[in-house]
Image (cartoon, rainbow, N blue to C red):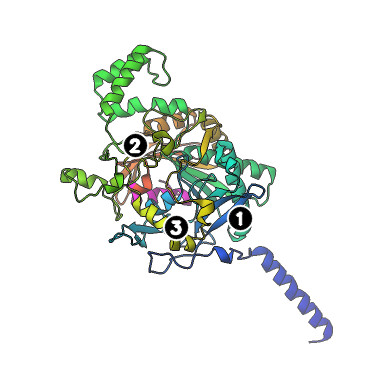
Amino acid sequence: MDGTSLIIYRVVLVFLACLIKSLVPAQSAPDDALITQIPGFSGTFPSKHYSGYVTVDQNHGRNLFYYFVESERKPSEDPVVLWLNGGPGCSSFDGFIYEHGPFNFEKAKTKGSLPQLHLNQYSWSKVSNIIYLDSPAGVGCSYSKNHSDYTTGDRKTASDSHTFLLKWFELYPEFLSNPFFIAGESFAGVYVPTLTYEVVKGIDAGTKPIINLKGYLVGNGVTDEEFDDNALVPFVHGMGLISDELFQEVKIECGGNYHNSLNASCATKLAKVDEDIDGLNIYDILEPCYHSPEPRDITTTKSKMPASFRQLGETERPLAVRTRMFGRAWPLRAPVREGIVPTWPQLLNSNSVPCTDDEVATTWLNDETVRKALHVAEESLVGSWELCTGRITYYHDSGSMIPYHRNITSRGYRALIYSGDHDMCVPFTGSEAWTRSLDYQIVDEWRPWFSNGQVAGYTQGYEHNLTFLTVKGSGHTVPEYKPREAFDLYSRFLAGRPL
């Protein structure tokens, strides 16, 4: 090869190297965020796990904590999903530990030891990369050095979460081209659409990096004060919890509107409805509700309930749902209104939550070896971990979510609104009604959907890629009550397959 040919050959090599580099994003996931082992788990991770902090406000030292699980299938191609638990004030480790994370947690066999972790066959990381985010600052492992940040609201939370995403994708640019979805449940019925709207605005403005947003999912999410408040009476009548006579009386006295009535007769009838359903577990009407002042002393083995009731909380997980945390939302007939939304500790003037046994999560996440493995900041900054904190003061300042849903879906982004059909806190009747109120044309008429060869619930599809779906027999937190069905609806939706 002569000198000229050699020069041309080298130029071509350099050109090809630059071309390949431009086409293939750098694998730049931060090394210090990689999780190499987790106390309580002795096996091999089925995919890479990362965790750490993203600073969303340098001046205040406001830092949001995340736990990132790469897909167990094709991380370079599978969707990236951001998961948000609600509250407000509840950590997204709720979803990680008790719902759809990579592990099932088995309660410690001896006092003082850690829970044992086993791989979860219905982990959502089997089909997606998933980020569990503690938001806003002050929740879970997220914190701020300026405690004024613990007074927050819908708009500030959405803005911070958007900033988090932009900075997160700068840390993990190899995932920027993957389809991106936002998901959550309960009060995340506010978090998800407000954040999705911020992301859409950022895309429109050309804010870099450009996020490849495809859609969002909301489970048993609060949406609109009037629709949420009006949902209860039709739900409890349909479930056989109040008589036909009372239903007709309250319908007449309230004129079919059970929200914010000034009619004294209507109020009296609504009080009778509340009296009839008092004592039920509002997060799943089939589940027993424990009233012990010492919720962590509750055990299934000492229960004197009939065997048929003991089996109600059984799932394919080692932890029965009925001994878990049901207080992920506000009390009965207390829809989210403009102004302060109290957290559970603030509602009860207590650190405990009704029908609660969160010993597994609390024990694990307050163990020093676990916190070190997960790169959690020192306790002087973060404090001890609580599933739902009373540290924040939260304002609902974005109004009804219906305009957000309309704005986003009308632009073609896909949306799945799903409801466990035995949840009385955010009844499916409200979600069904507000999705219908958008007046979108029905493109997939009400029908059953199937999981494992069985009817798993019902669904109705609308134009603009909006789908409403129920999960039969599930309570407030669908992936916890019905892990197989939740995995099926999730994986089909992400893939764009029929439900």
The three-letter amino acid code for the residue at tag 2 is Asp
Q: Earlier in the sequence, mark 2 or mark 1?
A: 1
Q: What stretch is highlighted in magenta?
A: 481-499
Question: Which residue is labeled 2 in the image?
Answer: 423
Q: In the image, which is nearer the foreground, mark 2 or mark 3? A: 2
Residue at x-position 69% and y-position 43%: 205
Q: Which of 228 and 498 is in front in this view?
A: 228
The three-letter amino acid code for the residue at tag 3 is Ser
Question: Which residue is labeled 1 in the image?
Answer: 169
Q: Which of marks 2 and 3 is nearer the N terminus?
A: 3
Q: Does the magenta stretch include residue 133?
A: no
Residue at x-position 38% and y-position 69%: 43
Secondary structure under the numbered disc 2 in the rendered image? loop
Residue 216, given in percent of the width and then of the height, sits at 50, 44
Question: Which residue is labeled 3 in the image?
Answer: 125
Majority secondary structure of magenta residues = helix
* Cα–Cα span, label 2 and label 1: 36 Å
Outermost residue toward the bottom?
A: 1
The three-letter amino acid code for the residue at tag 1 is Phe
Does residue 285 appear in the picture of this structure?
Answer: yes
